[in-house]
Image: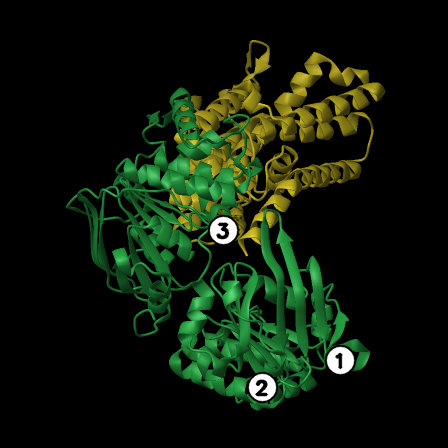
Chain colours: A yellow, B green
């Protein structure tokens, strides 16, 4: 089972991350102290959650650009609820966050499934709409730390067995979705629908419905991340996580998820997110300007895509040969 | 061998003029397949030469060699008698060779004029495209072929017939000397075909050499001056149309040495398992009805575009029919989706493995179990051990040799990919299996294996529908054959009627029995 989970693509990424850590520690040894690594992981947890959802969406040949806006809208809604009803238990907040995120994801899914609008157009539209809705419900005002209840802010930071709850949630999501992707019919349908939609249709899989479920999962994870984000940073406003959707897509691509669909694993998305998270956390401490940070992330994406394209090239030739024979 | 029956065409039979374009002794091999062996073809100015042959005879390969898309492995290309080569498509175009394809290769979002002059547009100041001159020239070309098309319209607004005219105008715009028309009438109405004939006459009068590829004998006799027949990549005969009859051409086209050996079967049809009546679709097929019994192999023969695959896809629930009924074991069923079809025991192995068959990025076992996952799961969770067991059972049954069931299907050979697809469908334990061109693109060895396996399945009581364009396969494997033409059943043949010429006659719509 493990053999199938960790393919050579993922092994390569583990190597790249190890190399990256070695490089950083040569200039700043404290970076690889366990306590700091826990910090980096915790910092990267929202990215991990979103990358898992995005991975599933990309697997079905779609893309979800609305994840960061979904996160921000859900975050604002739960913050305002917390301000209005400070005593509401965290469990309810979590249910509301996941529920609202799911609903927003379903909107994307329905538009892609029933109206057959290209996913990039749908989610570009909903991304803008979600951001607009935040402005409408908040009047553009911030919800600040002092307005939030202590319990609301404490939840993601609470330590359990040496790790904050935020990290545990990311770990749980990795395990849960590894099971979903490898052990359920739905997980198999995601791979089949993206790997070859025609063949999937012939095998009795409803490709549009499968894509709908992918968007729904992505939305649910974005909603969950929305609450975790605003409570961790103790602030909610229109522009939180602005542009974060690109980091999420980048994490997937670096993690070996094929933008053409059909190829990708939860572990890959996790590793891709960690790679970006390490760069993000390390560059300031080794005193490299944030502009370099963007360039390095961008470079990593191009290298990752080039490697994936190389891996797929051989297969392309085989297809060509068959096509020639057929004539 | 028929080759000996056909004497070499005497040289005095050839037109006195030099061939504008000729192929001499051309050979072309693809991995595992010899597409052309030692074929020759002469195209004379002001002459229409018809190229005739079954699917797979090598016609498309010849067109690709003539237009510089493929390079021959041996032989010479002669332009005005001088040896030359077409290393790139532009070289062929430079010698005035142009092709009008079955599906016109044009650009929907560009204007008619842009389509005509793409790549060789008239230039104005600073090397920019001179749109005015381009439009004017396009209008002149279109007028010249009697086409009433506004050169400034977008191509997508045009009907298929007008698109053909644009393609022809494009061919003329590069000062073509040789025009290749690959089944140009396949998608045209009767009136449009008449107009196309006039145009071909015009081109002929202008001294162009025309290669006309067609399956339809009536149009070959109508407009061709000469003929060339290919079979299995060999040149079978050529000469003047006036010297031959339809029967001669049919014989040249299908007659072959029966070297292919098909499994011996003693068909023992049982009860009727599938009954289709009045199946219709607004545009693709009409009034399809037949019965199929257990243990029977029913062949579906027809020319490309006869509606066979379209009907099968509808029967399988991919598209909805506008009318018609299906009964399985005497019980009416409503098939709305492929899932319904699989549920009712009908499975479809499509023609295009890459497009519709296997999922190349998934391992063998996941491909095989994909349509059966409902059986292999509980509450949405897969039972992996059962999956492996099922996959192993069917890979062994099909003698599929691969390192492991975890191997991605994309890493397998074409023949093995086909086996995965067949295993996938057998694993659903169907009653009726539809095989669409089961051996297309498969090497000879695997072909025999597929045929043996079909015979075995029929012997086990499975009802098989085989769509095939290969006459030997249809005749060698089928107990009965339904011939389709233009979306309708043209004939249902069995026993002594199963004869190559009868099939071709019904498929092409030629009246009269075999000669």
SS assignment at label 1: loop
Up-down relation of residue B154 to residue B384 (above or below): below
Q: What distance separates the C-alpha of mark 3 from that of mark 2?
A: 51 Å
* Label 1–label 2 contact, CB within 8 A: no
Residue B430 pos. (x, y %): 29, 38
Q: Quadrant of residue A26?
A: top right
Q: Nearer the viewer, mark 1 or mark 2?
A: 2
Q: What distance separates the C-alpha of mark 3 from that of mark 1?
A: 41 Å
Query: Residue drawn at (49%, 88%), measured in percent from left and top?
Result: B198
Up-down relation of residue B366 to residue B148 (above or below): above
SS assignment at label 2: helix
Residue A312 pos. (x, y %): 64, 40
**Residues marked 3 and 2, same chain:** no
Q: Nearer the viewer, mark 3 or mark 1?
A: 1
**Residues marked 3 and 1, same chain:** no
Q: Which residue is mark 3?
A: A122
Is there any visible trace of residue B113 in the rendered image?
Answer: no
Q: Which residue is mark 1?
A: B123
Q: Tag 1, which chain?
A: B
Query: Residue drawn at (39%, 39%), measured in percent from left and top?
Result: B452
**Residues marked 1 and 2, same chain:** yes
Residue B203's mark?
Answer: 2
């Amino acid at each position: 089972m493990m053999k199938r989970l960790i393919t050579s693509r993922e092994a390569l990424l583990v190597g790249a991350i190890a190399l990256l850590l070695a490089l950083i520690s040569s200039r700043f040894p404290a970076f690889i102290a366990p306590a700091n690594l826990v910090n980096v992981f915790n910092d990267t947890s929202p990215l991990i959650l979103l990358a898992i959802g995005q991975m599933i969406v990309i697997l079905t040949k779609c893309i979800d650009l609305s994840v960061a806006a979904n996160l921000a809208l859900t975050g604002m809604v739960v913050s305002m609820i917390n301000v209005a009803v400070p005593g509401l238990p965290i469990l309810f907040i979590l249910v509301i966050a996941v529920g609202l995120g799911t609903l927003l994801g379903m909107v994307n899914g329905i538009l892609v499934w029933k109206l057959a609008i290209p996913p990039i157009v749908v989610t570009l539209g909903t991304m803008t709409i979600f951001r607009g809705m935040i402005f409408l419900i908040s009047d553009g005002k911030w919800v600040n730390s002092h307005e939030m209840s202590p319990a609301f802010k404490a939840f993601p930071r609470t330590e359990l067995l040496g790790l904050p709850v935020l990290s545990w949630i990311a770990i749980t999501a990795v395990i849960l979705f590894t099971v979903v992707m490898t052990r359920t019919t739905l997980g198999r349908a995601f791979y089949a629908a993206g790997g070859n939609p025609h063949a999937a249709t012939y095998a009795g899989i409803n490709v549009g419905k499968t894509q709908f479920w992918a968007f729904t999962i992505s939305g649910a994870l974005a909603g969950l991340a929305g609450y975790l984000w605003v409570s961790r940073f103790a602030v909610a406003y229109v522009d939180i996580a602005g542009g974060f959707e690109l980091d999420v897509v980048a994490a997937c691509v670096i993690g070996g998820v094929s933008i053409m669909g059909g190829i990708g694993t939860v572990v890959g998305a996790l590793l891709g997110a960690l790679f970006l998270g390490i760069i993000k956390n390390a560059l300031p401490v080794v005193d490299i300007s944030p502009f370099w940070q963007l360039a390095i992330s961008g470079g990593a994406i191009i290298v990752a895509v080039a490697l994936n394209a190389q891996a797929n090239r051989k297969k392309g030739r085989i297809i060509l040969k068959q096509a020639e024979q057929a004539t | 061998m028929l080759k000996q029956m056909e004497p070499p065409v005497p040289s005095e039979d050839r037109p006195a003029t030099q061939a504008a374009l000729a192929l001499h002794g051309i050979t072309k091999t693809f991995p595992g397949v010899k597409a052309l062996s030692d074929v020759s073809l002469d195209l004379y100015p002001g002459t229409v030469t018809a190229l005739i042959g079954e699917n797979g005879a090598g016609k498309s390969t010849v067109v690709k060699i003539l237009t510089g898309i493929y390079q021959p492995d041996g032989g010479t290309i002669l332009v005005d008698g001088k040896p030359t080569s077409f290393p790139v498509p532009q070289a062929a175009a430079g010698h005035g060779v142009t092709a009008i394809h079955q599906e016109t290769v044009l650009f929907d979002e560009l204007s008619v004029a842009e389509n005509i002059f793409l790549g060789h547009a008239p230039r104005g100041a600073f090397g920019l495209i001179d749109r005015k001159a381009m439009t004017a020239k396009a209008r002149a070309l279109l007028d010249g072929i009697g086409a009433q098309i506004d050169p400034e319209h977008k191509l997508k607004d045009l009907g298929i017939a007008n698109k053909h005219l644009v393609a022809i105008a494009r061919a003329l715009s590069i000062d073509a000397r040789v025009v290749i028309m690959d089944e140009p009438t396949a998608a045209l109405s009767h009136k449009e075909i008449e107009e196309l004939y006039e145009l071909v006459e015009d081109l002929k009068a202008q001294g162009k050499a025309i290669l006309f590829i067609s399956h339809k004998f009536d149009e070959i006799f109508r407009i061709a001056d000469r003929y060339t027949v290919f079979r299995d990549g060999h040149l079978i005969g050529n000469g003047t149309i006036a010297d031959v009859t339809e029967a001669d051409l049919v014989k040249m086209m299908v007659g072959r040495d029966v070297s292919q050996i098909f499994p011996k079967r003693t068909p023992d049809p049982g009860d009727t398992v599938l009954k289709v009546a009045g199946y219709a679709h607004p545009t693709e097929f009409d009034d399809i009805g037949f019965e199929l019994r257990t243990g029977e192999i029913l062949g579906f023969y027809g020319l490309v575009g006869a509606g066979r695959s379209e009907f099968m896809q509808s029967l399988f629930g991919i598209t909805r029919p506008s009318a018609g009924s299906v009964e399985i074991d005497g019980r009416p069923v409503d098939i709305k989706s492929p899932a319904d079809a699989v549920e009712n025991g009908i499975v479809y192995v499509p023609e295009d493995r890459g497009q519709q068959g296997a999922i190349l990025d998934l391992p063998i076992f996941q491909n095989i179990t994909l349509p059966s996952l409902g059986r292999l799961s509980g509450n949405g969770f897969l039972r992996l051990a059962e999956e492996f067991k099922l996959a192993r059972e069917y890979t062994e049954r099909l003698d599929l040799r691969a390192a492991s069931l975890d191997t991605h299907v994309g890493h397998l050979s074409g023949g093995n990919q086909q086996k995965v697809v067949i295993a996938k469908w057998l694993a659903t334990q169907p009653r009726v299996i539809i095989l669409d061109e089961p051996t297309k693109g498969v090497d000879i060895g695997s072909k025999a294996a597929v045929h043996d396996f079909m015979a075995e399945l029929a012997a086990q009581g499975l009802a098989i529908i085989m769509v095939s364009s290969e006459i030997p396969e249809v005749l060698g494997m089928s107990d009965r054959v339904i011939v389709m033409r233009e979306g309708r059943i043209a004939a249902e043949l069995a026993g002594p009627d199963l004869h190559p010429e009868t099939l071709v006659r019904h498929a092409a719509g030629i009246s009269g029995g075999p000669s």
